[in-house]
Image: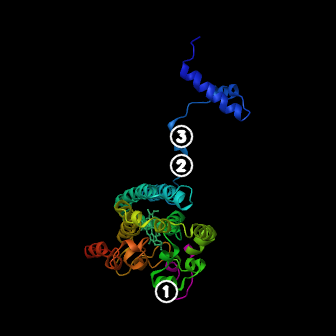
Amino acid sequence: MSTLSPEVQEQLASLAAKYAADGQDLASFLEGLHRTEYITYWDYVQLDTLLTLQKPRTAYPDEPIFIMYHQITELYFKLSRHELEPLVDAAVPATLEELVRRVNRVNRYFHALATSFGVMADGMEREQFLKFRLALIPASGFQSAQYRFLEFASTRLEHLVQLEHRAALMEQGADPQVLLDHVYWRQGATLEETGEKTLTLRQFEAKYGETFRTTALRWRGNTLWDLVQNLSDEDRQNPELVQALRGLDHQINVDWPLQHYRTAVKYLAKKPSDAPATGGTNWQRYLPPRFQKRIFFPEMWSEQEQEEWGKKWVDQQLASLDPQA
Ligand code: HEM
């Protein structure tokens, strides 16, 4: 029988001490190890399960593309939450270094999303999309809760209020519940004429409304925006931090929404009138960043930059647009 190397003996002694401290027997754990199978790649990443999560509702061959790219996006949203939520939950200290490191990771994820949106814009046949989407009403990406969590984590509620009411509610020092009632997406999915909420919104609120409320209240005063305000003047002006935060604002509130909007235009714009969105918003007014002006860190932008939020890009796109009926 081969003798155990000093390193292995040392590991065994250390393991024996670890288990003894919990009143456990090392020999039984070693026996269990002996019986355990090697981990495989496919089990580790749950590949078989992952690949069964695409369940199209129609037989159009491009529908799985639509599902898979949404799923990919949701995973990137989850990666982004994984960076921001420990900060706003105060699980890690919000030092300058930690803020820069984590925000840059989120920026990397959103850059990947914004630059891959061609999978949606150019990667499906328009005719197929226009057919299979009808089987999806009233579901809409509008109902992505993770997208809302990212917003709640990034900035104070005041900055998420619909533009029309934002300044007034901020000036009044409105109650968080009032701010939540006026959050831009709730207003965007409420019919102006009747004040009636779309079915998409009603479903969304029924499922997540309470979680949104408790989460937004829990993070109140500790969002990324607040954490930045708590830094020293010197740290707050740190060029790397400023670049990271402006990057985040631009990636989440301009670049990604514009790629998304461009795709909506490509599929839904037609003469003489545009196709309605599955979620029922007035999407031509709702989606463009220049109308919403969602800005997480307004202090980081000049008045002119805020005024022209997302405008230049849309002007270019609309000028080159020639939708076919
Ligand atoms: C062909 C592709 C797509 C089209 C035509 C499209 C269209 C739309 C439209 C019209 C809306 C407005 C809400 C409504 O009335 O339905 C919307 C919202 C939204 N969609 Fe998409 N979408 C597409 C792909 C995606 C993908 C891949 C995602 C990834 C998760 C996504 C996420 C969202 C989100 C988060 C919103 C809410 C945006 C906001 O509140 O500002 N969409 N989409």
> Is residue 288 visible in this depiction of the protein?
no
Q: Is mark 3 within 8 Å of ligand 1?
A: no
The label on residue 52 is 2
> Mark 1 = which residue?
168
Q: Secondary structure at mark 1?
A: helix
Q: Is residue 123 magenta?
A: no
Between discs 3 and 1, the one toward the N terminus: 3
Residue at the spot 56% in from the left edge and 59% down from the top edge? 90
Given this view, does label 1 or label 2 mark the residue nearer the observer? 1
Q: Is residue 98 left or right of residue 302?
A: right
Q: Is residue 194 magenta?
A: yes
Q: Secondary structure at mark 3?
A: helix
Residue at the spot 49% in from the left edge and 86% down from the top edge? 168
The answer to which image quadrant residue 28 occupies is: top right
Q: CA distance from mark 1 to mark 2?
A: 49 Å
| Amino acid marked by disc 1 | Ala
* Residue 222 percent coordinates (x, y): 54, 66
Q: CA distance from mark 3 to mark 1?
A: 52 Å
Q: CA distance from mark 3 to mark 2?
A: 16 Å
The answer to which image quadrant residue 128 occupies is: bottom left
Label 2 Cα crowd, 10 Å radius (few <14 / some 14-19 / many 20+):
few
Residue 6 drawn above or below residue 137: above
| Amino acid marked by disc 3 | Tyr
Q: Is mark 2 within 8 Å of ligand 1?
A: no
| Amino acid marked by disc 2 | Thr
Between discs 1 and 2, the one toward the N terminus: 2
Region rendered in magenta: 187-200
Q: Is residue 167 left or right of residue 114?
A: right
> Mark 3 = which residue?
44
Label 1 Cα crowd, 10 Å radius (few <14 / some 14-19 / many 20+):
few
> Is residue 183 visible in this depiction of the protein?
yes
Residue 140 drawn above or below residue 78: below
